[in-house]
Amino acid sequence: MSRPLQLDPQGRLRHLLSMDELPRDLIVSILDRAAEFSEAVSGPDKKLPNLRGRTIVNLFFEPSTRTRSTFEVAAKRLSADVINLQVSASSTTKGETLLDTLKTMEAMQADMFVIRHDASGAAHFFAEHAAPGVAILNAGDGRHAHPTQALLDLYTIRARKGDPAGLRVAIVGDVLHSRVARSDIHGLRILGCKDIRVVAPPTLVPAGIEHMGVRVFHSLDAGLDGVDVVMLLRLQKERMLGAFLPSAAEFHRDFGLTRERFARLKPDAVVMHPGPINRGVEISGDLAYSERSLILDQVANGILVRMAVMDMILESRESGIGNRESKGGGGGF
Ligand code: ASP
């Protein structure tokens, strides 16, 4: 389980591996800190001294646009040094290769690794083997978890719609292959959201998902009825080994957010998508950046939430062994 790895004995964040088992207060304090960063970087000078002298390694074994670049921007806004490694993963050489990569980068005195890998559990593996002073952030492992995506989604919902506890949220599409869906469900549940719906064709719903406290719908119109937030998911063709669907066009017809369906939503309902979008599949292209689409807010908020997580983890490591003023930065924000 993640908890003993993720939290130190004082309950502070050590590594971020998954949303399940994160205490509610900790999630709220991450969101609050992200909000403070939003204020702090709103002027022309977006650089804060918090992580000066720290080295953060982005280790991406799978492609990424938003997550990798927003982690990099976040680290740089906090004045850390950033190394980006795009590693092509061979699933046959996993175990030892991962460990060797970790140890090699640790030898360069990295303080934190941001890891994306196609194997569920890869981030746990790193956290189990990391040296005591080294933190691991999961930037997506297989179908398992994508905790910073969930945190930025919660931040975005809270900023636009208020406390998620009182909202109706529909998660629509390829839930089966989606680490985002799993992490979002955990996060929403922990923040008290009582009406979470999963809307997908039967082939794209993981068995037993009801046990996560969600209701499953196989009709999009029924699933979207009265919702405040529609979270669309990408059809993950790269993770589909068999035929899960007749065609993308058919998926769009039955489960895509079309103009007609959008018009039937509550007038203040908002639309989200973690990206990348398959235009004309999950959502009709003209809706992607509409007034009620929060897709670009999600990208921008990803920077703030990732700043908050990196700052909180490295801050908790600093306590007792000096303080950030001694790095010449003049403190946080
Ligand atoms: N970018 C998200 C992820 O890495 C969602 C997706 O790829 O569909 O999981």
Image (cartoon, helix red, strand yellow):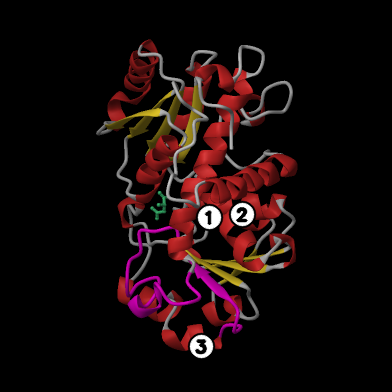
Residue 79, magenta (yes or no): no
Please tell me whether residue 214 is drawn above or below residue 34 in the rendered image: below
Q: Badge 1: how crowded within 10 Å, few (<14), some, or many (20+)?
A: many
Q: CA distance from mark 3 to mark 2?
A: 26 Å
Q: Is residue 230 left or right of residue 303?
A: right
**Residue 24 percent coordinates (x, y):** 73, 44
Q: Is residue 138 left or right of residue 154?
A: left
Foreground pick, 142 / 30:
30
Please tell me whether residue 238 is drawn above or below residue 269 in the rendered image: above
**Residue 241 percent coordinates (x, y):** 32, 52
Q: Dividing the image into 4 quarters, which one contains the C terminus?
A: top right
Q: Magenta residues?
A: 265-293
Foreground pick, 72 / 150:
72
Q: Badge 2: how crowded within 10 Å, few (<14), some, or many (20+)?
A: many
Disc on the earlier residue, 1 or 3: 1
Residue marked by disc 1: 181
Q: Which mark is residue 185?
A: 2
Instruction: Please give the name of the residue rendered at 55% of the width and 82% of the height, measured from the top-left corner.
Output: 221
- Asked whether the beta carbons under mark 1 and mark 2 sit within 8 Å of each other, the answer is yes
**Residue 210 percent coordinates (x, y):** 65, 58
Q: Dividing the image into 4 quarters, which one contains the N terminus?
A: top right
Please tell me whether residue 203 is drawn above or below residue 84 in the rendered image: below
Instruction: Please give the name of the residue rendered at 30% of the width and 44% of the height, measured from the top-left corner.
Output: 63
Foreground pick, 202 / 142:
142
Residue marked by disc 3: 263
Disc on the earlier residue, 3 or 2: 2
Instruction: Please give the name of the residue rendered at 52% of the width and 33% of the height, measured from the top-left corner.
Output: 310
**Residue 195 percent coordinates (x, y):** 70, 66
Please tell me whether the stretch drawn in magenta is mainly helix, strand or loop: loop
| Residue type indicated by callout 1 | Ala
